[in-house]
Amino acid sequence: MEAGPRDTAPSTEHGTADHGGPEPDGGALSPDGPDETPDGVADGPAPAEMYGDEVEVELRPQRRLRIWQLAPIVCLAALGSLMFAFPLAFDFGDSGAVIAMLGLLICSCAAGWGMMAARRVGYIWPGLPQRGSERRADWRTILVYALAVAAVVVLAVWRVARLRG
């Protein structure tokens, strides 16, 4: 009968083979291999050769918006929102509607610039797939975003139209 992997013997002691002769090379091996290498056998480069001039290079840079990217976006958004809000809050006459619409345009440009900068560093809108992935965006998510933008534009135009009339 052949011994298989599940064959259990009554004795669990492991036997060692004893050939009755001297050990080869005069001694036993250490657990991690021979202590000395014979002459003429290269064991790889010396440690000084392996670690020469080291240069650290960041392989994956941090994906964050830097201050030089954020500062112009924030300044334009603040300027545009002030240009939009003040003519609507305080009556500036006939030129108030034009200044308000110009402020809305500047604020919208700053928002678009901010979205493009965020997309460039890898941020995404909730519900949209990562850049470069094979997934397609869900049409319901795009519809929700389009309706939100349309509602903001309609409310802004309606408010400016009320200011003029």
Image (tube, rainbow, N blue to C red):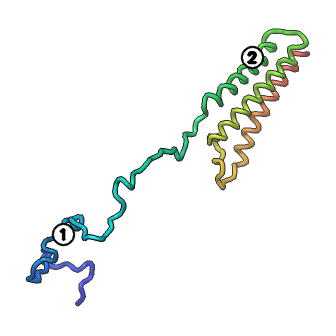
Identify the amino acid type marked 1.
Answer: Leu
Residue underneath mark 1: 29
Q: In the depicted view, which residue is nearer to us: 61 or 109?
A: 61
Q: Which mark lies nearer to you, 2 or 1?
A: 1
Q: In the depicted view, which residue is nearer to us: 54 or 95?
A: 54
Mark 1: few/some/many CA within 10 Å (<14, 14-19, 20+): few
| Quarter that holds the N terminus | bottom left
Mark 2: few/some/many CA within 10 Å (<14, 14-19, 20+): some
| Quarter that holds the C terminus | top right
Q: In the depicted view, which residue is nearer to us: 27 or 3?
A: 27
Q: In the depicted view, which residue is nearer to us: 124 or 155?
A: 124
Residue underneath mark 2: 82
Identify the amino acid type marked 2.
Answer: Leu
Q: CA distance from mark 2 to mark 1?
A: 82 Å
Residue at 79% x, 33% y: name it. Answer: 150
Left or right, 139 with respect to 158, comes to left
Q: Residue furthest front?
A: 40
**Taking the image as drawn, is residue 155 in sight?**
no
Q: Residue furthest left?
A: 20
Q: Is residue 71 above or below residue 4?
A: above
Tag 2 near tag 1, CB within 8 Å: no
Where disc 1 sits, the SS reads loop
